[in-house]
Amino acid sequence: MKPLDIPTFATTQLTLLDYELQSELEETHLLTSTHSPSILQRAGLAILNLTYSGQRTGLGGKTLIDLTLDPAIGGGSGELPSHGLRVGDICAIAEQPKGVERRKEREGMENRGVEGVVTKVQKDAVTVALDREEVEVPGGKLWLVKLVNDVTHKRLHQTMTRLQKMPSEEYSQLTHVLFGQASPTPISEKALQAEIEWHDPTLNESQKDAIRFALASKEIALIHGPPGTGKTHTLIELILQLLPKHTRLLVCGPSNLSVDNIVERLSPHRIPLLRLGHPARLLPAVLSHSLDVLTKSSDAAALVSDIRGEIDDKLAAVRKTRNGAERREVRAEVKELRRELRQREGRVVGDLVRGCRVVLCTLHGAGGFHLKGEKFDVVIVDEASQALEAQCWIPILGCGAEKVVLAGDHLQLPPTIKSVNLKDGDGKKIKTAGEKEVQMTLETTLFDRLLALHGDGIKRMLTTQYRMHEAIMAFPSRALYDGQLIAAEAVKSRLLTSLPYEVQPTDDTSAPLVFWDTQGGDFPEDSQPSLSSDENGEEKQKKERMKANMSLLAESKSNALEAALVRRHVSRLIAAGVREEDIAVITPYNGQVSLLVGLLKGKFPAMEVGSVDGFQGREKEAVVVSLVRSNAEREVGFLGERRRLNVAMTRPKRHLCVIGDSETVGRGSKFLKAWMTFLEEHADLRYPDLADAQEDER
């Protein structure tokens, strides 16, 4: 790839980001206006039957609202139903619409509530920080609805606008390298061979090589971490090696969970570090480094705590009184107290940030006011292959770093893009410095682009994997990683029968790789809407226009007979002694997820059932993959995406069971044909008949 013109790049990114925002807004409006609350809850976009259970004042004077399940609902367990709301999600708290209300009466109901951001998710409660100060939470039965995160879009827009308008004389050497206008500084062999005293003696040679390379690089270093190769483990050692060099580090990830994983692993090393934002993992090792906890334990914490307590008391009084004049008077006092709280808190937070050499936050959080004016020497981005490029520029532009280290795997799933016209093959053209047009889409990450720009010389790959049996690892290693992956001695031959509890040896538990080949047409797929909707002609037309990128409304494939085979296989694993919580069932299609949940969760509540996309970054002892597609036309749709299949086949530790039609799947692409051939030659191959699918029912 030729060097890129920076203003043109930024302008194109702004256009693509605008399309994405509009797509998300249209989708959210269509979903909330055409689907009942119960359907939105099943889709993971809402939580119903909530009630207000308390409030308090949080960081920055924000009002924190605690929501729990209505005691009259849920059989007294108090646990929230399964949902898709996560820490950092923008949401609305509103009075729950009644099921009998017509669509027009439901439309926009979430906008009549109060908006905020989810700051804590527990089994029995959700905490939301309200955006505005002088608002009242509705009474009665409430629901929580996920909204478009326009705050993130605004920050991305600001970042790309800054890059677009930046004078060329202000470009740093790093910026020149990131756009191919300069080559990375060559690294001497001496620097790569330097003696290093390792903090972790268990590091393998590929991990040590990646760390040496990242330490010696002047501007950029890419650490390519295939599944199970200890990418985050490697980053921890890199951070520890950088600290004695008087380096200040900003460590980021695209999600709260990715950041928390690093905080948790750094915590035992007892280095001064600060976690900005809202931790998703409510573990002491993570929470103890959060801004919320540290501001309460600093020398000036008592002053801040007193004001918070006074605000909480006054807000409690507001909820009790119905006198309008009294309410206005108390709210005026609260407003003044909040102003004073922010001033005192600002001084405490400023001291904490300036005193920390390792600051961790999400990519979005790196653009927050806490880091305004702060300078860092190195930016480290974990899970960089799951981040939009514009997200990565938030810390790069904001902190004046001279070097960036990206860690990820570009051969797994990229960030999710909702806008139809931004997928590969239909993006925007952008001119290089040599006037040559190249394709740009939001799916092209900074990790991808730098590899294309500078080649493999800026990358080091981790090659020893610590997750999979070597039979499970063999195909992805050969087909995607040039055959370079090696199974660590401790995992290369482990089976379900060697779990630390008793599992009976059977044909299933003794096999690391099983393929139920449903070829022959006896297990055909169905095609059905994943969710029903009450729509008129106009909504139906809009749905048709958007369905290619809206998994919730689009027709989602399912295969009932294949689902029955899944049930049979997991039933036999559990009968042999494998615990439910050690098994996952995954599939690329939401329609099949819905079918499998109905078929399995009642009988096996502890077993995880979900989509392939939602399981990226996860692992289980045993994984069953339902491929779904089986049709006379031999169509496979998005099943042909090899990055999605890579995620699917690399989740298990000891046992992978694939269920699918080799005749249909094998026609989808060269990659799929190679996989089917591999399974036929190396897996425990089984040809089911309809009696096998019905066995568990007898």
Image (cartoon, rainbow, N blue to C red):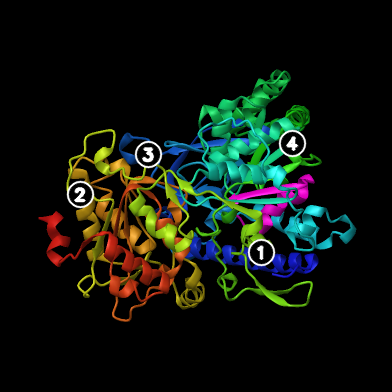
Q: Earlier in the sequence, mark 1 or mark 2?
A: 1
Q: Are marks 4 and 2 in contact (CB under 8 Å)?
A: no
Closer-to-camera residue (185/392): 185
Is residue 39 in view from this perspective?
no
Residue 640 horizontal/vertical position (percent) = 42, 70
SS of the residue at dot 1?
helix
Q: Which mark is residue 482?
A: none
Which residue was labeled with disc 4? Answer: 248
Q: Which mark is residue 17?
A: 1
Q: CA distance from mark 1 to mark 2?
A: 46 Å
Is residue 398 in view from this perspective?
yes
Closest to the camera, between mark 1 and mark 2, is 2
SS of the residue at dot 3?
loop
Q: CA distance from mark 4 to mark 2?
A: 52 Å
Q: CA distance from mark 3 to mark 4?
A: 36 Å
Badge 1: residue crowd in 10 Å (few <14, some 14–19, many ≥20):
many
Q: Are marks 1 and 2 in contact (CB under 8 Å)?
A: no
Which residue was labeled with disc 2? Answer: 571
Residue stretch rendered in magenta on the structure: 387-407
Badge 4: residue crowd in 10 Å (few <14, some 14–19, many ≥20):
some
Quadrant of image for the N terminus: bottom right
The amino acid sitting under disc 3 is Ala
Closest to the camera, between mark 1 and mark 3, is 3
Q: Residue at x 77, y 69 (%)?
A: 8
SS of the residue at dot 2?
helix
Q: Which mark is residue 490?
A: 3
Classify residue 482 as left or right of residue 408: left
The amino acid sitting under disc 1 is Leu
291 part of magenta stretch: no
Q: Earlier in the sequence, mark 1 or mark 4?
A: 1
The amino acid sitting under disc 2 is Ser
